[in-house]
Amino acid sequence: MDVSAIALAVAGGSLALALSTTFLSWRQRGTLGVQRDALKADLGLKQTMLSELDAATSAFDEAFLAVEDDMVRLVWGDETLKACAEALGVSYADGDITDCAPQVLEALSQSSPQAEADLKSLIETGKPCRFEIFAEKAVGVAGKTLIVEGRPSGATAWIRLAIAGAQTSLSSGPFAQMAEHLPAPCWIVSKDGRLVWANNAWLKAVEAESLADARERDLSLDRSADALVQEAVATASHREGFRWLTLDGQRRAFSVTVEPLSEGYFAAYALDVTEAEESRDALKRHAKAHDETLDRLEDAVAIFGPEKRLTFHNRAFETLWDLDPAWLAERPTHGELLDRLRQKRRLPEMGDYAKWKAQELEFYGLKDIAPDEMWSLPGGRSLKVVRQPHPLGGLLTLYVDKTDELKLKSQFNSLIQVQRATLDQLLDAVSVFGSDGRLRLRNAAFDAFWNLSAEDMVTMMDFSVMAELCLPLVHDKGFWAELKARVTDTDPIARAPQMGEVRVSDGRLARWRTQPLPDGATLVAFADITATRNLEQAIEDRDMALNESVRLKREFVANVSYELRTPMTTIVGYSELMTSQSAGLNEKQLNYLTAIQSAGRELARSIDDVLDMAQMDAGEMQISLSDVTFGTILHDLSLRLDGVLATRNLRFEHMGLSDDTVIRVDPRRLGQMLDHLIDNAQRNAAADTAIVLKTDRDGDTLRLEVSHKGRGIPYDKQAHIFDRYVGRERGGPGLGLALVKALTELHGGWITLESEPSEGATFSIHLPHQNDIELPEPKIAPQDETPIDVDSSDDNTVWVA
């Protein structure tokens, strides 16, 4: 290619480059103009926003601190920082507040542990934070609530400080005003223990006029409460305690609570829990009394808590199951208790124990009392198990030993059956009615007596219905109404035992009787006494006949004795007359006269015996006791025996009491008793022997023994020797020994016999009541010592030598 072509190409390229450069420059200028206008507009906006931000910052009393590394500088808010420094007690140079920013940040960190932790996290890790503190440390400076908010921005931590306008001190604001009206004492202290604020209740409790007065006088609610606050301040944690405080002269219980506040202060309040504490003490006493009551029960009681552990058991529970008290004190679970009882074979025998145990533990879901259950234990014991939910949660179980009760019930049922069988064997118609007037029990004789069938009688029949069935036999409705009243009336007088008679329409005579029973029931019995009354009438007729025969016998005896005594007296009198004029009579004739006299006297005494026995049978015999000397009795006896014993070669001997001994007897009847005993002895005594009378005093009793040697009394006759008509083998009516026994008993004494066949016999008379004798004045006998014969009726006669 030539040069011109090259030059043209170069010129064209240069022109194209110049045109391209010019076009690009023009476009670049337009773009830069637009950007300039945008930057001018943005700058104006930023300036406007900065002005508004400055105005807003000044309006809201805020200060901004920037923290970079270890440098703290004030970015904005001189006045706000100054107010915060004054509230926090930070000093600064006059007119220069910027240098105190680090001290303000340090004071904020020391206000509370939480504030220190939040600021440390903001500066070291960039963690945002926000909190409030109440600053009131400077004296004379009103407290302020400071709002602290921190945000990270790159390597700088920004802290905004603001003063809350709604609260300038603890005593203002709605919550503080509410606290002023609380009845419980409330107060706030600082970390150094200085009282910061207190409500009216606290001021009233410490008797302070104002908070300043309380500070000046250094008053406190109570030392124990102050100690609790100091403990909370030292540990910077929640504390709660129970204290007894004296307020208005009364000792009351308070629950004191201390809570740490985020500003480094501690709020305390005391709640009056006196009534709650008294209720708690009353509940404890009630629970203790309840436990003591349950412990005295004979039934076993166990209480399991909601966790199914044993919380209470009484002594009966230990005794019933024979469990170790130390093991029970460990509070075993219900399942462990069942396992232990199963090991000791104290539970009922069952095939699937695991299933049975699970069913037992399901009772903890009860909402009401479960049905009672009976357990039959291997040892033969029977228990009633009662389960019910416990009011405080858990389960209460009661084990009642029913073994003895079941035995008694079985015995009672057997007894009832025996009673029924026994009543059925009675001939009387017996029925038992309850206090409600219903028939409880009757025997077979009852149905037969009233002609009732089994279909007529129903269980628990009312008395009125039963009376209607019996009306055909006893038509008197008034009788049945009265009988019902005795059954149903609760008056003890009406229920007293009663009896009477009623005539039955078929001619029978019935005796009825009501008897109240201990359980409130009444026994009503009817007996057919028709045959008994007939027999009683026959006995009365026979008694009248016997009385008539006795009367006739007495009259006959009296007439016969009179008729016999008159000629007997004549015979004895004439025989004695002939004996006194015995001159010219031979010995044989004299013996005849003596025999006539002896027989006459014997017959006269027999007649007297018959009359005495008749008088005793009629109950007309009486004795006349008197105090006499034994010598009088012995003297009269000797006179009657004079010459009688000599004819039979017998002699009479006395040993024992002296003649001047005073005894209390009926002299005539005692002489009669001795005559019969000596007469019996002289007829049975061997020849040339003595009849001995022994007398002595045994305490209050006078004893007289008449004994002889010779023929005794056979053993087979000794038991009947004192019966009538037995004591004589020949002659006489045989009333002597029977009369002696009767006369002895009239004296209040008794007679005994000791006898051996062929060796003789001893009769002993015992007469009591001898200690009440009054000794009479002695009468001096004549010098010849001859006893003076006086009338035996003189009770005061004493023979003195």
Image: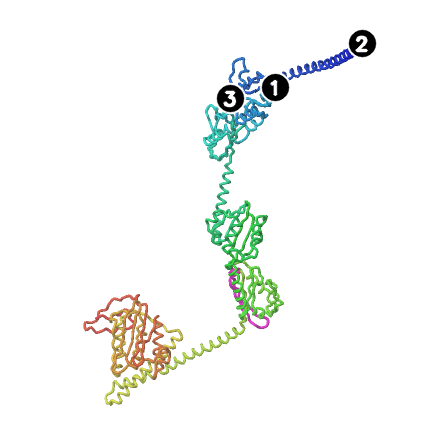
Q: Do residues under tags 3 and 2 come within 8 Å of each other at their CB atoms?
A: no
- The residue wearing badge 3 is 137
Give me the disc on residue 4: 2
Query: Residue 289 in the image: x percent, y percent?
Result: 48, 46
For numbered disc 3, what is the local secondary structure? loop
The answer to whether 60 appears left or right of 653 in the picture is right
Q: Do residues under tags 1 and 3 come within 8 Å of each other at their CB atoms?
A: no
Mark 1 vs mark 2: in front: 2
Q: Quadrant of residue 736?
A: bottom left
Q: Give above or below for 57 relative to 785.
A: above
Q: Which region is colored magenta?
A: 492-519
Q: Give above or below for 217 relative to 11.
A: below
Q: Residues within 10 Å of mark 1 (few under 14, many from 20)?
A: some
Residue type of the residue flagged with mark 2: Ser
For numbered disc 2, what is the local secondary structure? helix
- The residue wearing badge 1 is 60
Q: Quadrant of the C terminus?
A: bottom left
The disc, 3 or 2, on the residue closer to the chain's N-terminal end is 2
